[in-house]
C-alpha cells in the first residue's frame, strides 16, 4: 500500500512540475467594442468585455466582429504568466450615400 501512495505522490509531483503556466487576456474598450464577438485562432470565446485565463503561451490570431463595424484583427504573442489587458476601439462601417 505504501508503494502505491509513494508512486501516486511522485506522479502528482511530476505533473505539477511539468505543468505550463497559463496566460490571462482581458478584452475591454469603448462602446464600439462592447458586445463584439471574440475569436481566438478562429474559435469563438464570447463577447467583450471578457477575461480569458486559460491560454497557454504562444502566438494567437485575435479577431473581433460586430455588426456595422469593421472587423478588427491582429496577432498577439503571449508569454508565460503574462496578464494582458486590451483596451480596444472599432471603426464603424461608413455606408455610401445614395446618389
Image (cartoon, grey):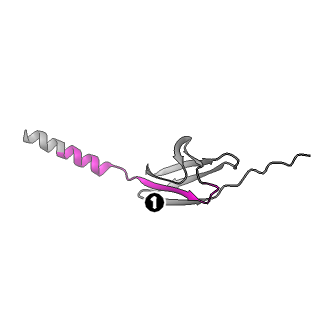
Residue 90 magenta-highlighted: no
**What x and y, as percent, mark residue 55?**
45, 49
Q: Are there few (<14), some (14-19), or many (20+) residues within 10 Å of tag 1?
A: some
Q: In which quarter of the view is residue 87 placed?
A: bottom right
In the image as oriented, which residue stretches furthest toward the right? 99
In the image as oriented, which residue stretches furthest toward the left? 1
19 vs 54, left or right, is: left
- Residue under label 1: 83
68 vs 62, left or right, is: right
Q: Residue sitting at 23 percent across and 46 percent down? A: 12
Q: Residue sitting at 46 percent across and 56 percent down? A: 79
Q: Residue sitting at 45 percent across and 55 percent down? A: 24
88 vs 54, left or right, is: right
17 vs 93, left or right, is: left
**What x and y, as percent, mark residue 58?**
48, 50
**What x and y, as percent, mark residue 18?**
31, 49
**What x and y, as percent, mark residue 10?**
19, 46
Number of numbered discs on residues = 1
Q: In which quarter of the view is residue 23 placed?
A: bottom left
Closer-to-camera residue (1/66): 66
Quadrant for the N terminus, please.
top left
Residue 31 magenta-highlighted: yes
* Residue interval drawn in magenta: 9-33
Q: Residue sitting at 41 percent across and 58 percent down? A: 81
Q: Secondary structure at mark 1?
A: strand
Amino acid at each position: 500500500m505504501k508503494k502505491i501512495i509513494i508512486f501516486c505522490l511522485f506522479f502528482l509531483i511530476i505533473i505539477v512540475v511539468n505543468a505550463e503556466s497559463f496566460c490571462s487576456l482581458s478584452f475591454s474598450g469603448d462602446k464600439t467594442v462592447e458586445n463584439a464577438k471574440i475569436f481566438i485562432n478562429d474559435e469563438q470565446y464570447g463577447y467583450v468585455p471578457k477575461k480569458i485565463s486559460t491560454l497557454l503561451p504562444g502566438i494567437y490570431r485575435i479577431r473581433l466582429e460586430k455588426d456595422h463595424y469593421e472587423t478588427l484583427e491582429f496577432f498577439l504573442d503571449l508569454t508565460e504568466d503574462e496578464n494582458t489587458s486590451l483596451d480596444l476601439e472599432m471603426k464603424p462601417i461608413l455606408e455610401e450615400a445614395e446618389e
